[in-house]
Image: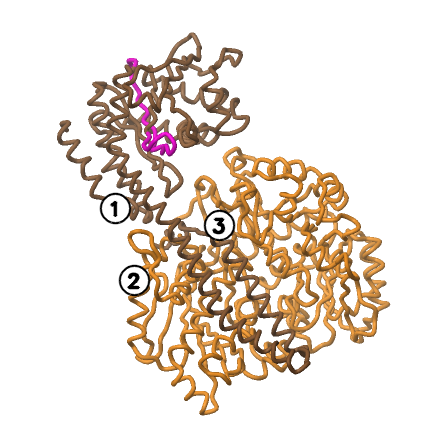
Chain colours: A brown, B orange
Amino acid sequence: MTRLELEDELSGLLEQDWAKLFHARSDIEQIFEKKVYKPLAQLILQQINHTDSVCYIAYFSKILNERVKGHYYCADGNVHDEIDSYGWGDFFKNVIIHFNLTEALSYYIEQQKKAYVFVFERSENPEIRWETLQLNPFWIKICEGMIKIALPHNGKIDTSLAIPDQLNNLLKAYKQDISNLFFDIYLPGIAKFFKWCNYLTFVPIWSGVKLRPLSIGIIIVFTNQYLSPEEIEKCMEIASKYLSPIRFDEEIEIQRRFSLRSAVAAIMARNMSHNPGSHGLAYLIAEIEEKIRRGQSLNVGEEKDLKNFLEYAKARMDFVAEVTTYWREMPWLEQLTL
Amino acid sequence: MVRTVNFVTDIMLPFVLNRKLIEGLAISEIPSFKADQVKWVLQYNTDKVEIGGNEWFTGNIDNLLNTQNISVIPLIGIPGGFLGFQAWYLILENFWRNLIKHNVGNVTSILKKGKVIVIHLEITDKQNSPFWTIKLWSDVEIDEKACKKINEILETGIIDAEGKLIPEGWGTKEMLVGACYLKGLPIMHANERGDQVLRCYMRDDKYLCYEFDVMKPMELLIVGYEAEENLQKNLRSRGIYIMHHVPQDFIVPTEYLIMPDIAHEEWTSWNDSLKPIKRFSRSLNISELKDNNKSLELLIQLESEFAQNLIDGKNTLCFILHPANLGDPEYQVWKGLKIDSNSKLQLFVIVFGIRGWNLQNLQKFVQEKIQQQNVCILFDRHGECKNAVIEIAKAHSDKLFWEPYGGSTQTSFTLSHVPNDDRKKLLLLWRIANAALLKVAILDERLQQILDPTDREEVEWKYGNGSEPGISAIECLRFMRVFIPRTDELNLENPEEDKIHQWICANRPHILSIHAGILDKIGKKTPDDVLKWTSSMVECMDSKVKRIIIHSGRGIPTNVPELKVPFVGYSAIEHYTVSRDLKSKYALVQELLSARGVKR
């Protein structure tokens, strides 16, 4: 497909009701495959002129609270079966389950930290170094540099090597004490991709402004040549252009969810005041006042009734407090029955 | 996450008998209205149970329940346990209020004829699904216009496009929120698909009927296995779920979890707070579970395995049920249960004066069993066995559990209204036994002050005819393996970290539930502080089962680590511990077992 055809297809993204699609969940992966990942991967590979390369895109959904799964695409839109099979096979089962760099990067961005590009390079001389990136002023505000990791074929890196602070900071910010997972499990897992390429470049995609950075996802480009800063910039531009509207739709939906939660709290507070309050309690108070006026006390039955009512009201207040802070949901349950 | 409850005794009875609420909601329109003028008919298939009416407010509830077979009404699953009951009450309360408010003429006319208002709750099986469908209507005739209006409200949603609350139909909207919660749906469904979550229609052209779905009990999740779709559907409808992989941070709603290899890294990276305490590692033939009896046998095996872990595997559990007389419902339902002679669980149903049983013989029997290294669990109606067992329980706290209970109480309901099927009955017996065995410690200054107030005498519970001395509530709870510190032992109003640590090490509970406010007071103000505290504290808990739960009465406080420490609402803990009649080790433990890590 030509660039124009791909762009035309991707423009359809603006017409979708993404919030609804994410809530429906059931078809989201297929929709992403067809309408997002496949044409976008093709467009990226065409535009950076690495048509013999492979591209993997991970979009992080805030509504689903996980990335939408996708395939490893070649420039012609076909799935690279071998990489895909490793990526969703052993790499996923044995590596991603322990440490997920795309998730760590995404988390780091949302903590208002500057993003990094990660480049893994096949090399018999292991090395980890930090480099500044010569990006245009717009991108450099958010992505200040890259971490280059030169890996031997077996992925083993001597941890006595100098490790840039930026990498240490990212690992620590994501989870405590996970650097061994990164070095012992993640890097050897990544190195196995070198069977098909020389470089893996992780390009973060984000949106928003400094105080409110929204991580959208990650693009991983598998190439035989080094990606230049201009090519990295292009990846960022294209992905950001097409994925931002999806993320924007999700953000609005999330705001609506919080609005709804507040509205539900308002309804429950109002009805608490109306039903057990102005009906139940008001009647009860009047009854007790009458007893006081007559110098009588409550009999056992009346005390029991009072206790039942107060327990009910107390549990209701507790329930309202819980619902305003935590909504117990199991959306997968209904999904199973569709 | 989801607790299995008895719809009749746990949900409906407290509501129906809440006289002040029922009358309060009606009295503005019908000043002379009495709560006994409404009857609730619960129906499953053709079986019906009726509650309400004058005798339910004046008579013996046990007797009234016994005259009907309430086990015909199926058990239901409630997200959020005790607090989740309130989701039901949102529906019932508003239904009742609107029925009175909008139909004064018709209601009054029924009452004038000397009749009662009848409200129907019909449960039907939503075939091959994890849900029951509930139909709720009353026999008060209602204009069709009301139905149309309600449907408009349900379709319009709760908030508008800008996120603003649409201020009308408050009661209907609250019912919708309740229905959404009970089905475990995301809150957005209440806004986007209100008319699907809560369906409203005219029944027989004259009655306004609401329909919504609630969960069936959620028993077992099996991960790491696959099964064909039809089998999965069949199993789900019986509360058994199969998942090959679990999504990240998956919160297990079931009581049991089976993993093929519990130590495999894929499962260990999944936070324990999101899993049930009752988790097991074993190989399974999934297709065998299609047979309902096989799946029940599996659950019985799991309970038995759990119990054996708690009692070191070598001892036998001696379950003694002591009803006060032969007419007590628990005697009737348990006396004939046959248990395999090789079973690690033995059941003795004894009534004094029958087959030579008396206080002395019981004492001798319990002593012998304990000397033979058995663990005895004694449920004692009216606490009549107190004098026979109290000294033994003091000397052998690890070998004897004693829970006294009265009629029409939480515990008597648990023991009296049981499934008709013998396998299900046996499973319940194991569950009650395991709940008894678990040592639960509760650190909460409010409970401490209720039971052992600093400004007056410690609370005592009286059993028997009332002439005998009472028993300290805290001591009684200890015999039930529920540990709440006395004020002079550990003052929780001014908590000190070291003393809490010492107290936990001394009692070595399996489950510890601590008030978030206490953590706050000892300086654990952030989720990280709390996590460090919990990991240091589990070290001194019982090695067989360890679970720390945080409870609070103000929703999820900010110091509760997300998805890492189970949480439960305060009301539930209080409800099942501080009252002589409402206390129930089984209900308390079921509530605690259903607690999971939460996300704000």
Look at label 2 and name its amino acid.
Answer: Glu
Q: Residue furthest bottom?
A: B113
Are discs 1 and 2 both within one chain?
no
Q: Residue under mark 3: which chain is it in?
A: A
From the viewer's perspective, is A214 left or right of B470? left
Determine contact: label 2, label 3, CB under 8 Å: no
Please name the residue that numbered disc 1 is placed on: A17
Q: Give the distance between the C-alpha atoms of the residues marked 3 and 1, in whole angstroms.
A: 28 Å
From the viewer's perspective, is B563 left or right of A142? right
Look at label 1 and name its amino acid.
Answer: Asp
Where is residue A252 shown, x and y percent of the image? 32, 44
Q: Residue under mark 1: which chain is it in?
A: A
Look at label 3 and name its amino acid.
Answer: Thr
The part of the chain drawn in magenta is A206-226
Please name the residue that numbered disc 2 is placed on: B155
* Residue pictured at 39% horizontal, 20% vertical: A192
Question: Could you say which disc has been placed on residue A325 in the image?
Answer: 3
Q: Indicate which disc, 3 or 1, sits on the residue closer to the N terminus.
A: 1
Where is residue B538 shown, x and y percent of the image? 67, 39
Numbered disc 3: secondary structure: helix
Nearer the observer, B433 or B285? B433
Where is residue A290 shown, x and y percent of the image? 61, 80
Q: Residue furthest top?
A: A125
Q: Is any atom of residue A90 visible in this view?
A: no
Callout 1: few (<14), some (14-19), or many (20+) C-alpha neighbours within 10 Å? few
Numbered disc 2: secondary structure: helix
Q: Is residue A334 above or below residue B59?
A: above
Q: Quadrant of the rendered structure where residue B581 is?
A: bottom right
Q: Give the distance between the C-alpha atoms of the residues marked 1 and 2, in whole angstroms.
A: 19 Å
* Residue pictured at 40% horizontal, 54% vertical: B187
* Residue pictured at 69% horizontal, 48% vertical: B310
Nearer the observer, B224 or A117? A117
